[in-house]
Amino acid sequence: MSSPPPPQTLYLDGSLEPVHAIFHRPADDAMRDATVVMCPPFGWDDVCSYRSLRDWAGRLASAGYPTIRITYPGSGDSGGTPHDPERLEAWTAAAAAAARWARAATGSGHAVAIGIGLGGLIAYRAAAGGAPIDDLVLWTTPARARAFVRQLRAFSKLERSQFFEGLEPPPPLPPGELEAGGFLLSAATVQALDELDLTALPLPAARSRRVLLLERDGIAVDARLLEHLEGSGAAVTVAPGTGYAEMTSHPQTARPPLELIAHITAWLGDASTLGPPAAERPPAHVPGASTSAEIQVGSVRVKETPLTIRQPFGNLAGILAEPLGRHEAGLCAVLLNAGAQRHIGPDRMWVEAARRWAALGIPSLRLDVEGIGDADGDTTPYAANSSLYQDEFVHQVLATLDVLQQQGIGDRFVLAGLCAGAYWSLHAALRDSRVDAALMVNPARLFWDQTLAPSVAPSRDFRALLSNPTAWSKMRREASRQRVRALALWLLAAPKRTLWDRSARGQAELALSNEFDRSFDQLEAAGQRVLYLSSFHEPLRSELERSGRLAQLERRSNVTLEYIAVRDHTFRPIWAQRQVHEALDRALEWELGDQAGRHAAPSSPNDLAGIKK
């Protein structure tokens, strides 16, 4: 049996905005007569599970099931914003469009939707509305969407109390809006969800349908939904749904639920057969989808296109936002992964920034490096932070710049990233004079030495506890078991550390100190700009401040320091996200204004005279 071809990125029609989708096609000699539509969860759960769902779709394709993964309008790489009207209608239309296109592209006579969380509500609503979806797999799906909204409200309230503890809170959101995990639901969307009750939506021809209801790590399925489905005459199966917590734990540690995937694959096989021979199947390029999309940004439209960069292990993946029409190669922005999060960036900020900058005439690529998001590579999560600070990622960034220049998209570059992405930005700038500016958002480290790496995190936790002893109970409640264990082992080992250990660490710290000076001297001499943007009580900023390095950076002519008063590494509050956007826009404005003179800057870092969101 042949191997499946590489996944194909598409933009589907049939919704209010272009729907970003990834299609996993089986090998022709393995094709089954059942197409799968994957409807993901919402917000942070989607961010954490994205790579696992990619792995899941690949396994289904290897088993012969054509599988299409969608992103809802107003989220991810799809068109629109959370504030656009009729989000629930747009999401439902997206699921229906995916089923129609995939069935047409494969000649399949059957479609199954796998809906997870909010995705289960969307999948059921689409099927009830007449979408070409036959069977349903619903995982952690409530009968009433208000239960989903209620969970988000509780999560949001807990987050807000932590994000601004000891700080001045921002103004509240407009009435009715809800933010949770860095993602927004408008008041109109919240109202539409509050009114959605699946038991009020009968499934057409229910007696001919199969439904697999999955528990959530031992939590029973919704009794009302089960009763409704059984009463409709559908063939309902209830099964354990083990692995949800592991799949949505964190992008660095999330793992696909392999046992559940095997169970669902077997359930699919109970009603599917091999499809028609390849020669009888419709061509892959069928109406209803394209390989690029036009996205509305205010009064301007920009074009978005998938971009792949070949590497020895496979392909890097990205989405390029460009001004419509021809443009001369000039300044180009590249937005890098925030740790192991995919290329949409923290809280989808890279999508918003890339489109806004493209509307101003600056091509902007949001990139996935090896093994993250839609890039090829080992799907094993980056459980250890040190795995993100490897030299090969900087080389991959530089290879991307080569491709962008060869294709005439840009010849000078602004790189931006959060956490590990900030590190890659800095080191790419140090190695390549084509990089005009490195925009670093909350870097965890500027330079990395494996001698220090094992003790960086626990030593930072220890200092945090000394400055705020009440943080211990909070750490035990919120931190991973591995993080608490690492701190405990570090404390136990402290009295036993040898003079050699301390000497080796001291030499490593001295080497990093010298590298710090040399590197920033080099950047200043080359006129390469650096933005260092941090949130409240970031460990690296505190360390730089204690050592006097922060003051040294502030005195450099090419470095701008900015600060946002929020206790969150990824700026999840909507208010904080707006502050990040404004800071990034200012940095880009400085760069655009520097084409005549490299070091002209606004008189105040809070002036935003040029670029407007």
Image (cartoon, grey):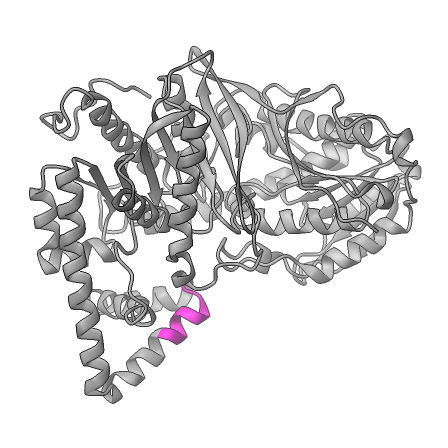
Q: Is residue 141 above or below residue 605?
A: below
Residue 262 visible (yes or no): yes
| Quadrant where the C terminus is found in the figure | top left
Residue 482: within the magenta? yes
Q: Residue at x 58, y 23 (%)?
A: 292
Left-right relation of 357 to 38: left
Residue 537's x, y, as percent? 23, 54
Residue drawn at (84%, 51%), measured in percent from left and top?
A: 1
Q: Main secondary structure of the magenta part?
A: helix
Q: Is residue 465 left or right of residue 195?
A: left
Q: Is residue 88 magenta?
A: no
Answer with left or right where residue 283 lies relative to residue 160.
right
* Chain part drawn in magenta: 478-486
- Is residue 453 positioned above or below 560 on the image? below
Across and down, in percent, residue 511 comes to 18, 65
Image x and y of residue 351, in percent:
45, 31
The part of the image, by quadrant, that contains residue 350 is top left
Residue farthest to the front, as pictured: 406
Q: Residue at x 47, y 11 (%)?
A: 325
